[in-house]
């Protein structure tokens, strides 16, 4: 059943969504897994400037988690999410159940050929993750049929994957990638930050400091030396690095060292207090 909270429609099924959206000329869409923060709200505000109607989905997608425990611990904060969306002026929230999105379960999910993107960095450390992301984003796009899709650059590789999804599916959707929103100490905003203790939260700022240090010293040292120093300094804060890599921004091909001829990005993934955090910085 569709209902209205303040001026926002809350819609639970794809049929109701289609009925609500029919006749709307320009739709901007922000898919999320909830536990919203200013990073998400920034995407919603951008969409509101550029579209007649702006919608957000909240759906913690079981198909993209590698471990049941990570799924179980994913922060859920729907009261706060509703308040943030209402304050931002979001027009509709799509809030489906697992059964609505996966009526046939997870056994026969479509396979998306993501090529190299599926085997490197996040692809290597989280096998199957991006196929799960594509499965849900594809379903959401088919349901919402937006002209414009807004995603954050914090998930650098995910943005590349979604670009590829749009090529594979030939859906007429424009992907708009918005800069990473950061806390005052530089930590990239993420729903997962909510799982950190106060001490962990303050240690987590070392990630951005490390990436910034690499960016600032790219002309005065080799990447390997800076990478090593950064991993060591993160370790002193109990941050265990999964990868800290230099890559070409257009292809995500890994680069052994700084290369003035490439557009470059440094990408990080690691764990602090059992919470997986990612970040990146273009150079
Ligand atoms: O980035 C996220 O929050 C999720 O991966 C997304 C795009 C909402 C798909 O579940």
Image (cartoon, rainbow, N blue to C red):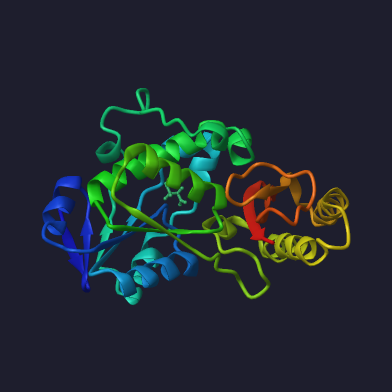
Front residue of this view, candidates 64 and 258: 258
Instruction: Determine the residue located farthest toward the top in the rendered image.
Output: 107
**Which of 270/23 is in front?**
23
| Residue 7 appears left or right of 170 | left
Above or below — where is 277 with respect to 42?
Answer: above
Residue sitting at x 33%, y 38%:
169
Q: What residue is at 60 percent from the left and 41 percent from the top?
A: 122
Q: Position of residue 198 (x, y in %)?
A: 67, 65
Residue 106 point in image, percent of width and height: 37, 28
Q: Quadrant of residue 136?
A: top left
Q: In the rendered view of the protein, which quadrant contains the C terminus?
A: bottom right
Residue 61 place in picture, x, y as percent = 41, 42
Image: 15 above or below 111: below
* Residue 84 visible to an observer of this rendering: no
Where is residue 78, by image quadrant? bottom left
* Camera-side residue of 178 and 62: 178
Pick whichever, 55 or 261, lies toward us.
261
- Total tally of numbered discs in the picture: 0
Q: Residue at x 33, y 55 (%)?
A: 57
Q: Is residue 175 visible?
A: yes
- On the picture, is 281 further left or further right than 18? right
Q: How far from the left and from the top, in percent, is residue 228?
A: 86, 49
Residue 184: quarter of image: bottom right
Side (left or right) of 238 relative to 163: right
């Amino acid at each position: 059943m569709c209902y209205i909270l303040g001026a926002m429609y809350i819609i639970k099924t794809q049929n109701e969504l289609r009925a609500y959206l029919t006749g709307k000329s320009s739709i901007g869409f922000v898919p999320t897994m909830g536990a919203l923060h200013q990073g998400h709200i920034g995407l919603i505000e951008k969409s509101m400037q550029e579209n007649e109607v702006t919608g957000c989905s909240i759906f913690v997608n079981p198909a993209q988690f590698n471990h049941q425990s990570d799924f179980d611990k994913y922060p859920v904060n729907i009261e706060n999410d509703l308040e943030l969306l209402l304050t931002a002026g979001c027009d509709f929230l799509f809030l489906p159940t697992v059964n609505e999105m996966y009526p046939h379960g997870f056994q026969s999910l479509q396979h998306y050929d993501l090529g190299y993107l599926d085997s490197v960095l996040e692809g290597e450390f989280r096998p199957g993750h991006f196929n799960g992301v594509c499965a849900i984003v594809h379903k959401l796009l088919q349901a919402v049929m937006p002209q414009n899709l807004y995603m954050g650059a914090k998930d650098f590789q995910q943005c590349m994957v979604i670009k590829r999804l749009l090529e594979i599916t030939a859906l007429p959707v424009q992907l708009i990638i918005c800069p990473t929103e950061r806390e005052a100490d530089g930590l990239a905003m993420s729903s997962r930050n909510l799982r950190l203790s106060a001490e962990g939260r303050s240690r987590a700022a070392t990630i951005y400091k490390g990436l910034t240090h690499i960016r600032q010293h790219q002309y005065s040292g080799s990447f390997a030396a800076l990478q090593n120093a950064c991993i060591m300094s993160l370790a002193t804060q109990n941050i265990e690095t999964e990868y800290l890599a230099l890559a070409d921004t257009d292809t995500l091909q890994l680069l052994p060292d700084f290369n003035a001829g490439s557009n470059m990005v440094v990408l990080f993934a690691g764990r602090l207090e059992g919470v997986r955090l990612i970040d990146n910085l273009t150079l």
